């Protein structure tokens, strides 16, 4: 992605078209962020803003993603407010819904599930009016909304929502079926249904492992660790948490000292386990799986 970003950036700068050059620079900066080079991503985003003849919401949306990756939550929300005004002014309903989804993600990383659910619900209210154009994003948004409701302990609403979306999600492919299973496992965990939660989470993890979706595998391992800890199976919870080590390199976290130190402390039982799980879950959630290098 970064290589093609450089190509697009160089080509656009030669066109003399400031819109094309600015958008290409923006995408180049975002590709750097996606590939984990956050420090280098700021400069092309700033340059894109200078090149564009008029303000563009994509700059603020990409910069919000970058600031989120840098854990600057206040900065990310500030950028998204600017994007929200621009998308609303231009009456870009799909774009505005995406801004609300992105803001919900920021609140989620801040462990503010109520605020996250509120933002996502605003996006959903827009998408339900967009018909077929917004259907795919609507299904994703409903899953995210259910996730926030579960974390916020609004379990009745979450269960009703998951029941409502089960059939349409089943028609969209294996990945969404596994995501639904994962959400159902989290719901049962929060509801205190130990055996059912374990069964669902382990089945979802096995499915994601078969698809080589390592970020999802690592996150479910952490959710299983939390479940075992919740029911007093401390040794098992430690073993589940330490399974994340197998996925660190492919997620670009093997050089993250906070992550590796926390896993070392979990192994030696010298850390607040629940707080460590929250920190690890946040780090893995922000990560991206590396693509295999072409030969």
Image (cartoon, helix red, strand yellow):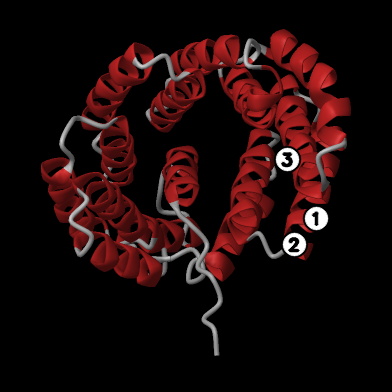
In the rendered image, residue 119, in percent from the top left (x then y), is placed at: 46, 15
Task: Kindly identify which numbered label has been placed on residue 211.
Answer: 2
Q: How many marks?
A: 3
- The mark closer to the camera, 2 or 1, is 2
Whole-angstrom CA distance, mark 3 to mark 2, is 13 Å
Q: Which residue carries the number 3 mark?
A: 179
**Nearest to the observer: residue 9 or residue 225:** 9
Left or right, residue 169 beside residue 87? right
Residue placed furthest toward the front: 16
Q: Which residue is painted at 58% across and 9% down in the image?
A: 125
Q: Secondary structure at mark 1?
A: helix
In the rendered image, residue 294, in percent from the top left (x then y), is placed at: 54, 84
In the rendered image, residue 132, in percent from the top left (x then y), is placed at: 71, 24
**Could you tell me if the residues under marks 2 and 1 are in contact, i.e. CB atoms within 8 Å?**
yes
**Residue 135 placement: quadrant:** top right
Left or right, residue 201 beside residue 293? right
Left or right, residue 291 beside residue 259? right
Whole-angstrom CA distance, mark 2 to mark 1, is 7 Å
Taking 144 as reference, is 202 above or below it? Answer: below
Q: Which residue carries the number 1 mark?
A: 207
**Residue 255 placement: quadrant:** bottom left
Which quadrant would the C terminus be assigned to in this image? bottom right
């Amino acid at each position: 992605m970064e290589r093609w970003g450089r190509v697009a950036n160089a080509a656009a700068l030669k066109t003399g078209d400031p819109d094309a050059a600015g958008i290409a620079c923006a995408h180049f900066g975002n590709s750097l962020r996606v590939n984990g080079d956050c420090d280098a991503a700021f400069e092309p985003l700033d340059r894109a803003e200078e090149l564009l003849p008029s303000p563009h919401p994509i700059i603020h949306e990409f910069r919000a993603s970058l600031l989120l990756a840098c854990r600057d939550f206040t900065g990310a929300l500030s950028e998204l407010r600017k994007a929200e005004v621009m998308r609303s002014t231009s009456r870009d309903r799909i774009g505005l819904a995406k801004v609300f989804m992105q803001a919900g993600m920021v609140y989620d990383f801040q462990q503010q599930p109520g605020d996250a659910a509120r933002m996502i619900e605003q996006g959903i209210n827009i998408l339900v009016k967009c018909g077929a154009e917004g259907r795919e994003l609507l299904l994703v948004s409903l899953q995210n909304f259910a996730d926030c409701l579960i974390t916020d302990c609004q379990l009745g609403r979450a269960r009703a929502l998951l029941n409502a979306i089960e059939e349409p999600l089943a028609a969209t492919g294996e990945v969404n079926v596994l995501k639904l299973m994962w959400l159902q496992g989290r719901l049962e965990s929060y509801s205190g249904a130990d055996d059912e939660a374990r069964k669902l989470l382990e089945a979802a993890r096995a499915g994601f492992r078969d698809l080589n979706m390592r970020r999802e595998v690592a996150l479910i391992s952490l959710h299983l660790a939390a479940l075992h800890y919740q029911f007093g199976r401390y040794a098992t919870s430690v073993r589940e948490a330490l399974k994340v080590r197998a996925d660190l390199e492919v997620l670009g976290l093997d050089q993250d000292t906070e992550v590796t130190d926390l896993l070392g402390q979990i192994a030696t039982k010298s850390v607040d386990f629940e707080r460590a799980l929250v920190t690890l879950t946040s780090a893995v959630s922000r990560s991206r799986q590396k693509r295999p290098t072409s030969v």
